[in-house]
Image (tube, rainbow, N blue to C red):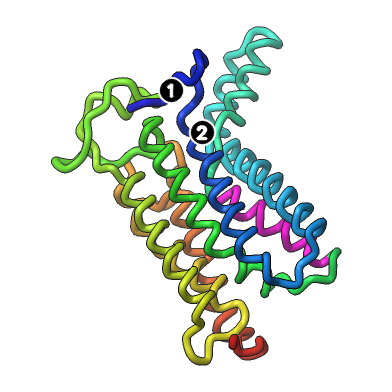
Amino acid sequence: MHPFINLFGMDIATYGLLTALGAMAAAMYIIFTFQNEEYNGIKMSILGLGWGLGVLFGGKILYFLTRLPEVLDKLNRATSTAEKWDAISFGFSGLVFYGGLMGGLIMTLILCKSFKMDSTKFFDYISPAIPLFHAFGRVGCFLTGCCYGIPSDFGFTTTDAVLKSCNGVNRFPVQLFEGLLNLLLFVVLFVLRKKPIKNMRRGDIFLTYILSYATLRFLLEFLRGDALRGVWFSLSTSQWISLGFIIFAIVRIIFFRKKQPILV
């Protein structure tokens, strides 16, 4: 594992670097996509900023909630103000993808409403950028040694991962597997946006992403070996959220899809 790389004499977190590269790749895709569209450049910049803030706050909040028992334990054992602040900082030290996704969607939906923009059409346009960004992030997870897989004969043994519980055991590279699936999902969504299937309607590309990723994530969670996400009634937090997204997509398809215009 390589949780840090040295650039110009500075140690830079690999996860942060890969996340930044993923954000740049997603931004380049969106700029390329919107160059022939009717969207206003200033509004797009505000939407991009809003999306980024939503991802940051949403990812931090859900991470805090998943680590809440540990945060409370640290607070109970804290004997000084500094230790209490350290406990709270620990709760916000990471990000959860689903939290970031929900935060980004909510912020963008609010901004689209304020700009009187069709949010369904907008989400169709940006949907391919989400798995593209996510693919970079999962490579960062692998190099850092977080979100690691179950013990497996096929995989890698690490000794210097950020999460010590990842070390010393041969583990399935679930991060790389999910990154590859995200990259394939990006290609599928990109092709569908350029050449829609007959009778596809507005919102179908976004629903394809939600339904596809939520299903994949639900299954991939069985290959995860870390317990940081929290487990409720034998399913992880991410699996429960995946089920929620799957139900949301199915409801949209059954009750609201026919109200949208056909893509041409």
What's the amino acid at mark 2?
Leu
Horizontal side of residue 13 vs 145, given as left or right: right
Residue positioned 75% across, 72% down in the render: 38
Of all residues, the one furthest to the left in this rendering is: 153
67 part of magenta stretch: no
Residue 55, percent from left and from top:
64, 47
Between the residue at mark 2 and the residue at mark 1, the CA separation in whole angstroms equals: 9 Å
Quarter the N terminus occupies:
top left
Q: Which mark is residue 5?
A: 1
Q: Residue at x 22, y 30 (%)?
A: 157
Residue stretch rendered in magenta on the structure: 98-113
Instruction: Give the residue type that dot 1 points to.
Output: Ile
> Does 110 lie within the magenta span?
yes
Residue under label 2: 17
Expressed as whole percent of the image width and height from the top left, the position of residue 92 reads 61, 31
Q: Secondary structure at mark 1?
A: strand
